[in-house]
Image (cartoon, coloured by chain):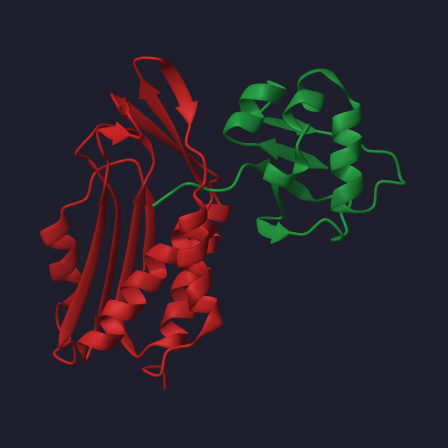
Chain colours: A green, B red
Amino acid sequence: MKLLYFAWLKTRTGVGEEEVSPPSEVTTVRDLLDWIRSRGGGYAEALSDLSVIKVAINQEFARPDDPVSPGDEVALFPPVTGG
Amino acid sequence: MIRVQREDFDLGAELAALTAGNPKVGGLAVFVGLVRDLSGSSEIGAMTLEHYPGMTERMLEEIEAEAQERWPLEASLVVHRYGRLEPGDQIVLVATASAHREAAFEACQFLIDWLKTKAPFWKLEETAQGSRWVEARDSDDRAAARWTASKPEAAE
């Protein structure tokens, strides 16, 4: 699974992009966020407030209950501020 | 048509190209977003726009398709820049062309309202106190939400 981090999520995790293999019990967006947070350090800090984090799976906005699969590209970012 | 680019755009040339050869166009509405020099009470020296290549284009295409479905447009264009920009620089161009002004005005406002809440761009402001990520505003969410509440009568 490919994870992407943008804006302050990139700054706080210190990672822009990484390949990960979460355990098999990680099946939803919510599971995945909990797992990333459990890795501690910058991850725990960056994901301390999930209410300000948006998730996209394969470049489409996703909800907490949406399923995630090993081949997915999952992006984490704050609410958008373009325009 | 949508474009995501680092370089500036020539407003006159973009608009001329959008309506060229189509005499059905009776109205052209345009929104251009610029970099302000003030954010709250802080002076902005510059800002850097980051985006999510791939998803950005996909979302802009989805938003444009939604506008085309809701209003009888002859043409539409969204150009959004990324990278480092300074106060006064152009950030975004939204242009919509239709036979009549109502559809052009409404579709243009719809496009910029939805873009601001759905296209994955983030602004990093540079101030004398350091750099900081711009926070999303509730007023932008409300502006986008009104287009969900009611579909326009101008749509066919």
In the shown orientation, is residue A79 left or right of residue B126?
Answer: right
Q: Quadrant of residue A49?
A: top right
Which residue corresponds to the image point at 27% horizontal and 59% vertical from the top-left? Answer: B77
Which of the two residues, B42 or B131, is positioned nearer the viewer here? B42
Q: Is residue B128 at all visible to an observer of this figure?
A: yes
* Quadrant hosting residue B6: top left
Q: Position of residue B127 (x, y in %)?
A: 31, 18
Quarter placement of the N terminus of chain B:
bottom left
Q: Is B133 drawn above or below residue B102 in the view shown?
A: above
Q: Position of residue B28 (x, y in %)?
A: 16, 67
Q: Is residue B111 left or right of residue A23?
A: left
Image quadrant in which you'd find residue B91? top left
The answer to whether B125 is drawn above or below residue B33 in the figure is above
Of all residues shown, which one is farthest toward the right? Answer: A25
Please state if B70 lies on the left or on the right of B74 as rendered. right
Of the 4 image quadrants, the one containing the C terminus of chain B is bottom left
Is A25 drawn above or below residue B83 in the view shown?
Answer: below
Give the residue displayed 43% in from the left and 65% down from the top: B146
> Residue B42: image x %, image y %?
29, 23
Tell me where residue A45 appears, x and y as whole percent: 67, 21
Residue located at (30% from left, 13% from top)? B128
Q: Is residue B19 left or right of residue A57?
A: left
Residue at x-position 58% and y-position 52%: A60
Query: In front: A3, or A42?
Result: A42
Q: Is residue A70 visible?
A: no
Nearer to us in this view, B40 or A20: B40
